[in-house]
Amino acid sequence: MMKTLRYFTAVIVLPVLCTVCAASETSDKFTKCLPNLAAEDLGQRRNAQQEWQDYCRHNGNNPAVCAEIVSLSAEQLEKDTPDETAVWLIRQLGIAGNASAVPVLAKYLAKDDIRLRDEAARALANIPGKEAADALKAGQSEQAKAALMAKNTKTNPPAIRTETAMPLALPYAPDADVKKWMTGYAALDNAGKTAALSGLTVRASQGAKSKAGCAVYIPQAVEAARSDDPALRNAGFMAVGAFGSAKEVAFLCECAYGGERAGIAKLVLSRMTEPSVDEELVTMLMAEKEDAKFNALAEILRNRYNVTAGPVLLKRAKNPATVNKIQLLQLAEGLSSKEDVGDFIDVMLILSAQADKETNADAKRNARQNKEEAEKIIARFLKGDAAIVMKKVPQWQTSPDVLSLIGRIGDDNTLDQVRQSRNSLLALSNWPNARVAGDLLAKANDKSASEADQNRALRAYIRVMSLNGTKKDEPIGIDISDQDKVKKLGEVFAAVKRTEDKKLIIKRVGQIRTVESLRLVLPYVDNAELQESAAESVLDLAHHVEFKRKHIDEFTAALDKVLAVTKNSGFIERAKRYKDQK
């Protein structure tokens, strides 16, 4: 039996998506997994992808629910979706998709990112029916043209053992026929070579024996990868990835270091399945001195989830001379364990020391931002476990930087210890939720505290009190209604003196979707100092159509007021648009 064609891939395609038991359950699971499909934490990303895949695979094969999976994925792809999420969703549509998914997939054939074009083309090649074929026929990318050829081959398979049907028969013909036909490869034009290499790529994906048989054609694949013809070049790269080995890693890396071939070279290196490829990449990473090349290798190994690379990245990041420390921490994040947290903290402290040494204001601000970004990476990495930081740094109570980090992690189990620290505000002002709101408000009202500490506590209080969520198991961390949040922020607003604090409250209140928020900020549209902030918050609240409809009279009057006073052209355009929405 002819095996199902999987075009342009050197890896085993994910198991066919099965479906779930009930539509509402499908939607709930999709909603839960979706935010983490492109999470910066690679472990979190893997877990979300695996959870969605396993959930589908283990819940039967209900066509109606399968249709909902297609509908949910297609609807998400119509939005401003991160590329990593889009790649994953497109791949699923290629497995479980039908004609209803074709319009949205067709749009991805014109994307700049080769991964998106490639996945969309392969997905359309796998979806049966005229609609998918027509979309590929209309596509301008080389991936679309090649996938159309693959689709036609699958629909109208060539007669196996018939030499004249080559190169379409290459994925399925006996070894002797392939060998005989390939003797004339050098005489083919570029289109013929492209088709031949694409056929060999599919052949190599059919098992270890097929892959070994194709390996003899690596010289032709490498030559094609060097071509100036985009279609032939891409076919060459995919063939190298399909039946190449560690011997080709050096060539692929040179291409991955920059230029128009970098994208596809990284893609191929990220997908090659032979274990020796990892060994070769790690060896090259350890020996590489040049930052740009080191970063490219690190990115590829991160995409391969090679944990061996994690310590190498951290060692490089700890070098004071390394300039891209944040990028290296981001790459190491998904390749490290909690045992490595000391290295992450070392890098954070180096960044803090560099910020302290800066004399230029802009440079100092950028350096502090890098230090704060390092804190965020560590906080994501530790997932709420600050105890391990306290263990790694016994003097944490006397270290402002480590206290700041502990606060950003926000471990409730260590909160009492933090409160007992003399410099507790450094941690409490970074706390990710409102469990410390009382501490912050008390410090903001403490006349014995310095003005700087009072202001820091006040701004932190405003931040945590305006977080989304109303239950203590949600981000805000305490059980409080949105109406009560606005009430508490209104009380603070009435007491503060600094204009910048008033602007911050108005801005944050504009993110709390209640009519009380509108009523609090609207009077200040007439205030010269606060007009811009107040008008923006009115517009932010009006952006939510269903919410606006529930209070249409108040919003109509508020938008009219904004239009009457603002000179901001962007605000005018938004206000008119929101008024016209029905």
Image (cartoon, grey):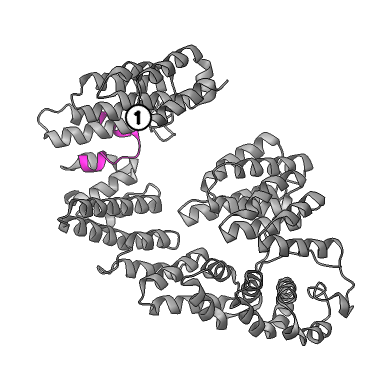
Q: Visible in this render: residue 481?
A: no
**In terms of depth relative to the viewer, which is nearer, 160 or 4?**
160
Of 434 and 126, nearer the camera is 126
Q: Report which quarter residue 159 is drawn in.
A: bottom right
Question: Crowding near pointer 1: few (<14 within 10 Å), some, many (20+)?
Answer: many
Q: Which stretch is magenta?
A: 425-439
Looking at the image, can residue 300 be seen?
A: yes
Judging depth in this view, the residue of 45 and 361 nearest the camera is: 361
* Residue at (69, 40) in percent of width and height: 71
Is 430 colored magenta in this rendering?
yes
Please give left or right for residue 428 compared with residue 311 in the image: left
Where residue 148 sits, quadrant-wise, is bottom right
Relative to 535, is 231 on the left or the right? right
Q: How many marks?
A: 1
User: Residue 146: x and y, percent?
Assistant: 72, 65
Q: Is residue 18 above or below residue 315?
A: above
x and y percentages locating residue 78 in the rendered image: 61, 42
Residue at x-position 81% and y-position 72%:
168
Q: From the viewer's perspective, is 360 left or right of 186? A: left
What residue sits 40% from the left and 20% below the top?
A: 563
Task: Name the residue that disc number 1 marks.
Answer: 508
Say if 203 sits above or below 463 in the image: below
x then y, percent, for residue 363:
22, 55
The quarter of the picture where the N terminus appears is bottom right
Q: Quadrant of residue 427?
A: top left
Q: Position of residue 552 (x, y in %)?
A: 50, 15
Locate the C terminus and report the quarter of the image it occupies.
Answer: top right
Q: Which is the main secondary structure of the residues drawn in magenta?
A: helix
